Image (cartoon, helix red, strand yellow):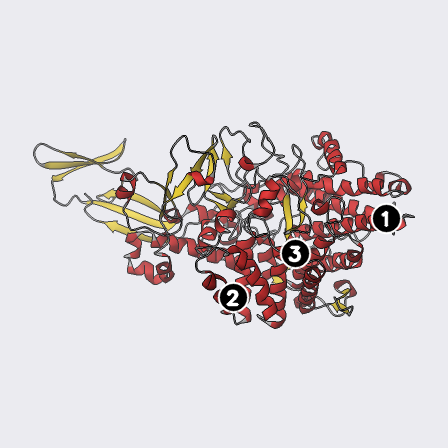
Amino acid sequence: MKLKNKYLAIAALGAVGLTSCSDTLNVDSPSQMDQTMVYSSTEFATNAINGVYVLFGEDPYTSRMCGVWMQNTDVEAMGVSATTATNHRNAVWPLQGAGNVGWSDVKKVWDNNLQAIERANQVRAGIDASAIGQQDEMQQIKGEATCLKAYRYYLMCNFFGDVPYYDEAAKWGDEIDKPRTDKNIVYSRVLQQLVDIEPNMKWSDVCTGGIERMNRDFAIGLIARIALFRAGYGMTADGTMKRADDYLDVNGNADLAVTYRDMNGAEKTARTYTDYYQMAKDYCLKLIQLKPRSLYPDFEQAFINEMNYTIENNAEVLYEVAFVQNYGGDIGWSFGVANTGTCAQGTTTAQVAITPTFYMSFADNDVRRDIDVAKYGHTNDTVTASASTGLYIGKWDRSRAAHDLGSGSSKGTGINYPLMRYSDVLLMLAEAENELNGPTALAKEQLTTVRARAFANSPTYSNDVTNYVAALTSKDAFFKAIVDERAWEFGGEALRKFDLIRWNLYAKKIEETMRTALCWGIACNEDLMNDPAVLAKYPEAANYVTWANKLWYAKVAKGNQKNLKSDIKWYNEKYRIAEDDATMTAAGWVSVNWGSNMVKRTRTYHYNGADYGTTTPAKVANPDGTVTYTLGTAPNTTTVTVADGEPTGITRKDVYAASDYYTRLYRGYSNGALTGNGVAPYLLPITTETLSASTVLNNDGYRIMDCNMEDGVNVEVATIIKENYK
């Protein structure tokens, strides 16, 4: 049973009437009420903290930060149109969001985060001043406020870079117009507050609301996560990616240090990036030692629980955002399997998609592939197969929701969203340990645990898990394995973008993804694979000759269909087959384009030096044994008559280039041309409306002013000419 807190539901309902007339939610906050009254009881204090949680139900979070703006990466990526659109999500996706200086949605995100941070600060201050502030429940609420503040700053620093930092609640007469503070100082300050309050928080299995409220389990995991970001890279004002150690006085500036105690009681102070890796390791170990738990045997179970509105504390999910049905929450709407047409459980909008190269990256027996990636959808309550450029997240499917959402429903499914799972803690520990000491037994144990579930029923388990992990003998190899494993484990959960940022791999992964897609498309084309010039330029295309150009499927007989993905039987799911199209079609199989979508062909016809366009010439056999070809379309046509079998003089010209799909995904970085400067322009600008109200904020630097707003250039692979076309 879902333990939806009644106060959160009341707060959400109260906010509905306010959202239409205000850019930001304006429900009563602690600063608007008498503090003595608000924090004189745990019930009133709970109302106050709910004023922070309720902002998760607003569009700036549910329809923007939750996932729609967490693209485009090598995992989650939404295709965009040919026309560059500023002031629209179509610019955020392909890394052109820096041009959105006037878009109100960016301002709403900025305001939503700062409002949540101020409310959290007010709760912290109110409890500190309360006569009952040291009581267990009040300390738990203060811990929730601290986690909420830290999480919001984690979002802001990854969307905007350096941002204003508000350490304490605003008071009358305070200066609230603040300049940007370096993100590393922000991370350090919120980490110190988390470290100080975490021991006073309650575990999820005793906390009111369990994993639907931020608890000690999650707080420890959040400390580890933010410590990794403090250790990692981020964009600086000069437009380059740097760690704090590269440009700040990490040993001399106290604002960049965090003091904590490890599990043995030893006091430590983190200053350098290595110290913060140690901090991440220490806190992962703390959770594992103080509150150990197992992963669900079934990888899909956590997501099934969410679709069933089921809460299980002290299990795999440490914290999930509690959404209220009919108010807030895009899980099963912009997130999840596509439902279109008329469906009993309502419809979706396509805004969070998955790349086909990510699907292809999975090992054959990894159960996560077909849960991370849905190569099917629902149209009019009937399962349909998807082409490679129409893949969505398979972890959530509104057609499987346990509640009756109704055929007219869309947003507001009430399906919860996990911000952290226990496998994240295991992989963070593996990463931190490897960074500090290389691929030790401790690091390998965590990776093994995660992979063991993914391949539990694999007939090649030893190769997939035991031998795979054992072969990771170098620090670099193990790190690469962690980068891959986090993709496979968390695909569709919107962690990838921020991970790539902190690793400084965003640009590299863009280039790898585009190159892989292009080589896959080349491998699917016989003409290109027979062209020595193409293979000389793209030799790795030979690595993809077994990857499918098409997938073939058949549906179960009508009358037996249950609108489930099992209604589709796949003949091949990844690899190319030996049978030709005619054989498969005759046997009743139907195809969807797969690798063939990775390259586009533009075919034109020419005669006597003139271009007659893309229309295939009409061929007519004449009674006298000649053949007449008609080229072009009216009024630009010509006819060619030759003896049957004789040269026609018609030239067929095939120009092969990268597909529009991949060209446009990352055009703000590479302009589609497989080249860039090594820094992905992921940051959003502070909007002109916010800047006009400030005397200290600006968009100077951060690659904001040099944003590339072009449409993308398709990489040309080859031109293949056929003379005397017949």
Q: Residue at x 51, y 57 (%)?
A: 509
Q: Earlier in the sequence, mark 2 or mark 3?
A: 3
Horizontal side, residue 434 vs residue 717: left or right: right
Query: Which secondary structure, mark 2?
Result: helix
Q: Quadrant of residue 60?
A: top right
Amino acid under disc 2 = Val
Q: Give the percent coordinates (x, y) of residue 536.
A: 33, 63
Q: Which residue is mark 1?
A: 127
Q: Earlier in the sequence, mark 3 or mark 1?
A: 1
Q: Residue at x 55, y 45 (%)?
A: 395
Question: Quarter holding the N terminus?
Answer: top right
Q: Which residue is mark 2?
A: 469
Crowding at dot 3, Cα within 10 Å, few <14 / some 14-19 / many 20+, comes out as: few
Amino acid under disc 1 = Ile
| Pointer 2 with pointer 3, Cβ within 8 A | no
Check residue 293 in the rendering and tell me which mark sits there, or answer none. 3
Question: Quarter holding the C terminus?
Answer: top left
